Image (cartoon, rainbow, N blue to C red):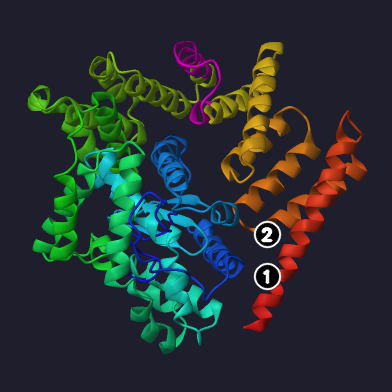
Amino acid sequence: MTLLAASLWLTPVWSQLPPSSPVLPSLGDGADITLSAERKLGDRIARELYRDPDYLEDPILDEYLQNIWQPLVKSALARGDLTPELMERFAWKILIGRDRSVNAFALPGGYLGVHLGLIGVVNTRDELASVIAHELSHVTQRHIARSIGDQARMTPWLIGAMILGALAAGKSAQGAQAMIVGGQAVAAQSQLNFSRDMEREADRIGYSVMSEAGFDTQGFVTMFGKMQQAAGLNDSGGFPYLRSHPLTTERMADMQSRQQLQTPKANNVDDDLVQAMMSARARVFAQPGVDALRAWANEAADTRIEQLQAPKRMGVLYGAYLSWMQLRDFRQAKAILPMLKKAAAGHAHALRLVQLLETELAFKEDDMRGAVNSLMTIANQATPSWQRPELIYFSQAASRLQTTLPTSDTSDLLAKAVMGLQRSVLQNPQDGQAWQVLATALAAQGRPLASLRAEGEAQMARMDIGAAVDRFRAAQDASRKLPAQMGDHIESAIVDARLRHAQGLLKEQMMERQDR
């Protein structure tokens, strides 16, 4: 991995083998750096990534990654690779970067970054799972901590600056020079790479974690095949994962020999269709220029499209629909919809994603009633409770309806949205996007105090502590000036407590800067 921030693709993912496994050496005990110190370093780096304009919050891609990530985490916990203490102390967050390069990265403290370019290049969810499982194993084995610990003379802020510099290098050399502070950090960069032993261990444990999570381990082998092909082409720079995780004949031979002992798994057509759609989504979002969008859009007009295998055809159609939508040519997008529905027929997960695409088009057309109706159709066909993308979209549409055309019906819709969001953030208080959507919904309900507090929580989740303090202060002022509403005294008490907490965090940050 290139720098402790770029494992089989960059590493935040999340070690000893279970008692039933052969005793193997643990290469990354991480004894040289405490869990708290590693988490603080990761938080410092993540704060900068949240502010990066390439940071992407997309409910559909977020859900797709979580559906891969969560089974791997559960598998690592069950095997004993991920300890309960580490699970509790680290962040375990995935951040999506709007970048075409094929890359993923792990950061200190349990943060994982995934570039759209990686999602766009994999053919199966198992290939992506192999990358994430590898990165997860770097973290559970505390390889990052060991790499940092070896640099005992380097201050945490210098290590953080170096990592940010390595990430910036993926965009421009000027950005890297701006982020890497001084020649000392540049000289130390090569010393923060994972060793070959660490890479082999991450392969071995990641392979087992992936297998026990229910993924097809053939994805590890085919992903290595992609890397080998890129290496043969001398890697033009679009495959930074390859540079951070150089292939060796030993690593490839080990994975191939392990795979020979596995029973091949039958293809899951629904999974393949979903993967094709998510890869297309990633490619379109990674290349938003007009020329690229027209190229994606025109692929659906090829008369040979019916000859493509089902997943490939689905990916082309989905990419074309999304591209026409981004180009705001809604007539062309709607013309593709019947073909999309036909391709998804009989596959519930794929059909749901097509219907969500219809909802997104309704938003583009500013048809909030149409968006709500589309989402209601999905809810009637799926589980009664909203899944996260539906909840986000439903809440946004209900807020817009209540703001523009308030009726008793829109009030009821908005009340349902607020209740759903409140349950969601209670279960996952670090969901910054959900908090922000809740803030908008509460404002539409005429609840300014609760709305300002939700804005503060959104900034806390995105680690912008200064902005959070500002929002909590605004909420505090509102509680004094506005007429009291039912429940506001409870909200006021929560605001006071959250403001004190945020001020304490802000003070710590200022002291850290002074220590530099």
**Front residue (pair 456, 498):** 498
Report x, y in % for residue 438: 65, 35
Crowd class of label 2 (few under 14; some 14 to 19; many from 20; radius 10 Å): many
Amino acid at circle 2? Ile
Q: Residue at x 62, y 22 (%)?
A: 401
Task: Locate residue 476, reporting x and y percent.
Answer: 85, 48
Quick one: quadrant of the C terminus?
bottom right
Q: Is residue 445 left or right of residue 156?
A: right
Distance between mark 1 and mark 2 Cα atoms: 9 Å
Residue 249: within the magenta?
Answer: no
Region of the chain picked out in magenta, as a range: 372-390
Residue 378 within the magenta-colored segment of the rendering: yes
> Image point 46% across, 12% down: which residue?
377
Ranked by sequence position, the earlier of labels 1 and 2 is 2
Which residue type does callout 1 highlight?
Gln
Q: Secondary structure at mark 2?
A: helix
Decide whether the magenta segment is chiefly helix, strand or loop. helix
Residue 221 appears in the picture as rendered: yes
Of residues 81 and 324, which is closer to you in this image?
81
| Left or right: 107 in relation to 133 | right
Q: Name the residue tied to disc 2.
A: 465
